[in-house]
Amino acid sequence: MRITLKKGTKLKGQIKIANVALSGTAWNPQEGNKDLSEQFSVSGINNVDNTNYEPIFADRTGDGREVFSYLYGSLDNYKKSTGSANALDQALNLKFNTTGGNFPADGVYANRNFSTMDFSQHREVRFLLHGAMQQGTDISLNQDGTEFFLKVGTESNYDKVVVPTNFNGWRLISLKMVDSNGDGIADTLQDVSDPSYNVRVEPVRSSNGILNFQEVSLILAGVQKEIHYAYTLERGEDSETVFSRSKILQPGLTLYKDENFTIVAGTIKTTILQQEGVYQIILSNNETYTAKFDQEKPTLGSQGEVWLNVIHLAGAITKEGTAYKGDVVVKLDEWGSAGAKYKYQDSNFETPLSVAKNQEVTQQEYFVKVNKIKEFPMEANLTKSSTVTPLITDSKDYNTVSLLDKGKVDRQSTMVRGDFIKENLPKIGLEYTTDQVKYDVMKRKDDARTYGATLSHTAGSFKNISAGYHITDSSIDYDRSKHLESANYYNTDENTQKMNMKVTYQPNNSFTFTPSYSLSKSKEDRTQYSAASQQDISYPKALTQNTGFNSTWKINKWLAPSVSYNISTQENNNLNAKTLTASGTRVEVGVGEVKTVNRNADGGVSLTLNGNELLPNSKLFNTFVISSSYRIQDADAWADVDSGFDSRKALWIRGGSLKDVGDYGYRKSLILRDTFISTQRWSPLARYEMGGAASPLKTISLINNFTKTLQSNEQTGTSYDSTSLTLPDMTFSISDLEKFFYGGRWFSSSNLKLRYSWVEQTNTGTDEQYTKQYGGDLRFMLFNYFDTVLNYTRKDSDKTDLRAGTSLETVRDSDISAQTSFYVGSLRVTPKVLYSAHDKWLVAGKISESTTTTTPSLNLRWDFNIPRGIKLPFVNKMYNATNRVIWNTTLTYTDKKSPVEVKDNYQMYDVTTSLDYEMSQNLRFTLSGGLTVLNHAYVETEDYTAYNVAANVTIQF
């Protein structure tokens, strides 16, 4: 609200504001019906501004006063809670005129935008509706022709509650949320209002859709023209015509003998839809009839207004969950052991770690281990589980449960294994496993059976021999009805064979050679049913191969190079028919006829030279170590390769393009990368005898890294190269600086590190970037009391466009920090200050970023023990608790400034604290909190205050 006073003539006076209030309503007429503004409008109505309005607390003939007492108590309590001498009651006023011929057949409505709501914690949805009134008056309309409706749910799944408007006063419409399919989750509304109100509920669902009361995102209120429906009731040779307010016959609906709905024929108890428009019904007199739809009889409509008030929930639900588990283990000497576990939890049982809600879970585990035969121990496991998850749609609460896992899911897995173990003979393992899953809702069954054998042995020069072979037969079967629903459903039978081998050949202590190989190959048979036939196809599905070796050859004590090479190949055939284009011709290829091929190779040579082995008598080079390597990393990707192409023999990517990949195969990408790395470590004076002021020289250490990378790239026919060079990347360190000047009394335990690095990165013919970074840190103890660290880092980066010869980006970063720590008793105090500056310039030296940040902080950490145990009742013993307390608090102030970005000008105050109490080694309690206050220098709306409080109890078993 804004009040503006403009200077005028010299007058004195007062301005009094008698009332400030909100006007209008948050409900809006539906979009697209602006031309019907004369037939339908929505507005607020209350007992203060509208004298014709009857507030619910003054209702004498209907349910209004009863509902008011239920929601607010007495009228005096309501006035006290609102702090007003007058009781204000406001409702939604829906004005309508359904008499015109152009009134929409499905009615018109008003909607309100709101976040989703959870209705599932209550039993009923209720609202008050006032009978139709003549517009703008307090006179009842007393005329048929218009019905009020309320839609509750989502856009695709909702219940439409319809109420005739030809009545006087307020009526309470009560709707019970009921479970219609027996899964324990309410999914539809059932009218439980006074039967004389003639309320009916018309459900609307999408295909396989269910109304989820845990996330209601739609409430629409509207009106529609009333239509009367004539049905013929037949029983034997007798027949009569009855009239209904709804075309859909459902339990609770009243049938009338006359079109004016004055003579009741009966109320429907049960209905069975035999075909469209034909029902078998049982009335309240327990007589069975066949009801056949005859005709619609539209009414003339009416003109008036209805009032909607207090949509609310009633009957809060208290859920009581049940869970139990048990386990037993039996051990027989010299024979082995056996055991079982059982766990059950119903759908109401929840824990803080529950992933999904309302799940009923049953789990069973059984095992047997037989050790009687020492040369062939055996074991067997059986695991069964059954999970019932509510079939909920339109719900983000169930995003951790896939559609496949909804409904009832039964799982069963078995494992039988035996190992042949005998000294000096190969260890052989035999294994058989099964996995079965049944998905009730998706009408799907998964079955997998695996047969496997493994071998491990060491024989002479052949060390750590390992080999394995596994065959897996798996299937996915859908019920035939699912095949008829969509072409996306089909049955598959897959056969996968896996083999692996690895061995280390070591004829002596100077040479090792370790080759390895693994292969996994899958093929699949697919069956798809249609209404009159079935289609069967077979095709290769996938292949994965990994092969390589590594070897070390110790030529002499100082020369021991290592070499390695590994390549991984993956093939994946297309699982759907697709269209390919080659030489301008479009070709259709079937399932499995083409595939992708992806290869990744990694290999290299490495060598480490030690000065103490090369020059054992040299003190200067005794600590000198050089570690160098050359590494290749290659990868390529091929698409639409002919299914018959065998990529297993193509073990070298740099050998050129793959041959005979088919008419449509092509290379999508290629990466060839060479990396040279060398690291030098040297403490040149460590072996010399030095004392006194020269002794710190013995601690000098130099570390330098050299890295150069050359990379060639090809992406869909476009090639480009890049290089990267790091030289130098050096760190110089020295300790015990206090000994230079004999300052050990006040300056001790010192260590100085200086760093400098230079990095060049070039994309050939495009751009290049240089990054220089240098700095250092100094750590020392001051007066043997203050543990102090000083740090400085500077980083400069420049990026240049090689084609235009201009600078693209220049960045300068500087960081300076100082920190010290000391103890006051058992309290550790750590003050720290950090200053950082950041500047960035773009093309033509235009500055784009510039900030300076100053951050002083103080950390307080108090770690102590309370030397006291806990006396246990009844046993007169002390429980020796650790009683350790850790209190940690940090106070931080941040001052950030920028001449470029307005948002980067603020002051921030931050306090965090935590109190950690460790009662024993397996019981800990933590209480923490924080407060952050930000004051922006220019934009007041950026200011904020944030706080947090948390408590955590940790119990470790």
Image (cartoon, rainbow, N blue to C red):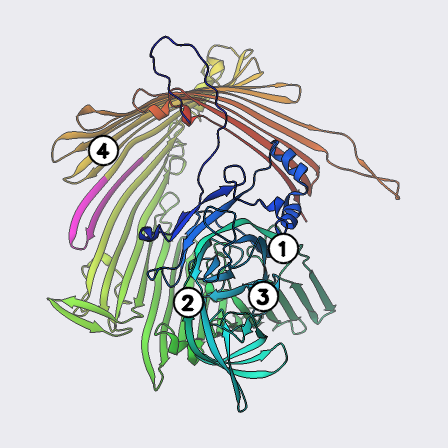
Specify which label sits upstream in the sequence, 4 or 3. 3
Residue at image position (16%, 51%) is 718
Specify which label sits upstream in the sequence, 4 or 1. 1
Q: Position of residue 15 (x, y in %)?
A: 45, 18
Q: Rounded to the nearest whole Å, what is the CA distance between mark 2 and mark 4?
A: 46 Å
Name the residue tied to disc 4.
Answer: 769
Determine the image quadrant of residue 600: bottom left
Q: Position of residue 526 (x, y in %)?
A: 36, 78
Q: Which disc is residue 500 wearing?
A: 2
What amino acid is found at the position of numbered circle 3 in the picture?
Asp
* Residue 652 in view of the camera: yes
Residue depth check, mark 4 versus mark 1: number of the one nearer the observer:
1
Q: Rounded to the nearest whole Å, what is the CA distance between mark 4 and mark 3?
A: 67 Å
Specify which label sits upstream in the sequence, 2 or 4. 2
Asked if residue 718 lies in the magenta stretch, the reply is: yes
Residue depth check, mark 2 versus mark 1: number of the one nearer the observer:
1
Asked whether the residues under the numbered discs 2 and 1 touch, taking CB atoms below 8 Å apart as contact, a structural biologist would say: no
Disc 4 residue crowd, few under 14, some 14–19, many 20+, Cα 10 Å: some
What amino acid is found at the position of numbered circle 1 in the picture?
Glu
Name the residue tied to disc 3.
Answer: 179
Q: Position of residue 108 (x, y in %)?
A: 40, 56
Q: Which element type, helix, strand or loop, lies under badge 2?
A: strand
Q: Position of residue 212 (x, y in %)?
A: 51, 59
User: Which one is nearer the viewer's eye here, 267 or 383?
Assistant: 267
Q: Rounded to the nearest whole Å, what is the CA distance between mark 3 and mark 2?
A: 54 Å
Disc 3 residue crowd, few under 14, some 14–19, many 20+, Cα 10 Å: some
Specify which label sits upstream in the sequence, 3 or 2. 3
Residue depth check, mark 4 versus mark 3: number of the one nearer the observer:
3
Q: Quick check: 136 above or below 911?
A: below
Residue depth check, mark 2 versus mark 4: number of the one nearer the observer:
4
